[in-house]
Amino acid sequence: MGKREEIRQRDGTVFPGGIYVDCLLKPVFKEQRDHLFQAQFQIHRAHVLMLYDQGILSKREAGEILRGVEILAGMDPSQLRYDPRYEDLFFMVEGLLAEEIGEETAGNMHIARSRNDMGVAMYRMVLREQLLKLIRRVQDLREALLEVGEEHLETVMPAYTHTQPAQPTTLGHYLLAIHDVTERDTRRLWSAYQTVNQSPLGAAALTTTGFNICRESVRAFLGFDELVENSYDAVAGADYLLETAAALTLLMTDAGRWIQDLLQFCTREFNVLRVADPYVQISSIMPQKRNPVSVEHSRSLASSAIADAQAVCTMIHNTPFGDVVDTEDDLQPHLYRAIDKSKRVLDLMIAVISTMEVNQEEMRRRAGEGLITITELADTLVRERGLSFRRAHRITSRVARRAFREKRDRIQPEWLQEAAEEITGQGITFPEGKLIQICDPFRFIMVRRCSGGPHPQEVRRMLKDRKRRLDADRREWSQRSEAIRSAGEHLRVRVRQLISQNR
């Protein structure tokens, strides 16, 4: 038997072929069942009520359809299995509804509607819920960063540039910097949410409908903030997916950078952070090991989330501007997985950061090594000796090289004297006590009172401001969540009223 005949025997001669069922219809059915089941019934409710309000359906028809919808919505979706009689979950629901209330009545549920606008609406409804859950996790991480940062306003540590010790700062200043990046990630997620939470319903296939529908009432019933006004845009536009993917990519990329820092800080060589026992794993063969696996997994999951988010962009890239399967059931799970992995990363990091032990003595000792305060010597030469900064920099550079050669962490008066003579032709000296002050990491921090700097008072001011902004952000989250909940409750009340009136 040739390959052609073998395939024909396996797949048959009519749609859908067996291989199409196995490779596409069954996996798609499972994804739809697991993610879109309740969203589709919300859309059915809103659409039928709108048709009734517009006089397109009678009270009897609308009530009967909604009665059937409520029966089917009460099913346990996990019990549903792919049925070759139906192409997908939505045709299955339509078929089950026809069995419940009759084919003619059930068929009228789809007046002035297409799978196109309905499908996009479901994706948007599911995605907005996922985004709200993720934003809540990001807010919780920000709270943890601010809480721990406030405990370490005077915990001196070396800050790094190009992976090398650069200047002293504080752990509070460092954690606040992570917070501020994460706060901007929150804004990007809110921007994606605003783009997602727009209703495409009423666009039908792409040119709306000849029926006198009210798109605005369906939008309100479903808790969408706005309409995607242009009906072609409503089914063709995929930027709500791209913006979400971009926001996820930035969130996890930003997180991956400081997660890498945490992994380095909790190595035995650094010995400045200790991950709490619930989040470390002991080696199966080396009992002395404390493996920070929670942080490692977070780094790995963040990278995996980025990969899923980038898959979304790749799948949409160079697709035609219209209703295409590339933006539908094959793509959506990538976003679900990216969000799920991001939430797992955030949950782990909230726990790790909130419970980690900080070796403050070791941090301060490291901040006193390698003359990383020596910028203050150059600044002092400018302020008190009138040198140009570039000349002062050349002098301090020679002092730093001398300290490195001699493996000393204190500036010696003769080093400064000799370097100044070489650069300016005349010696410059400071009292030894002043040179000791210049080498003090804490004093280095205390003289940096500029806006945004590490001075404890300035960091405290920024923390207070960030807490206020976080509170405002949480209020926005509550308002948006309540808007969706309230719209859903209003929809349920209207449905119950119409069903009861029809009895």
Image (spheres, helix red, strand yellow):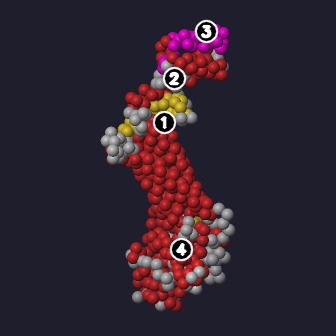
Relative horizontal placement of residue 487, taking residue 162 as reference (left or right): left
Question: Marks 4 and 3: CB-CB under 8 Å?
Answer: no
How many angstroms separate mark 3 from mark 1 (CA)? 37 Å
Residue furthest to the front in view is: 1
Sequence-wise first label, 4 or 3:
4
Image position, residue 415 (x, y; %): 55, 13
Specify whether residue 224 is in view.
Answer: no
| Residue under numbered circle 4 | 24
| Residue under numbered circle 1 | 173
Question: Crowding near pointer 4: few (<14 within 10 Å), some, many (20+)?
Answer: some
Question: Crowding near pointer 2: few (<14 within 10 Å), some, many (20+)?
Answer: many
| Residue pictured at 66% horizontal, 12% vertical | 424
Q: Nearer the viewer, residue 165 or 477?
A: 165
Span highlighted in magenta in the image: 408-431
Q: Is residue 405 above or below residue 326?
A: above
SS of the residue under disc 4 = helix
Q: How many marks?
A: 4
| Residue under numbered circle 3 | 427
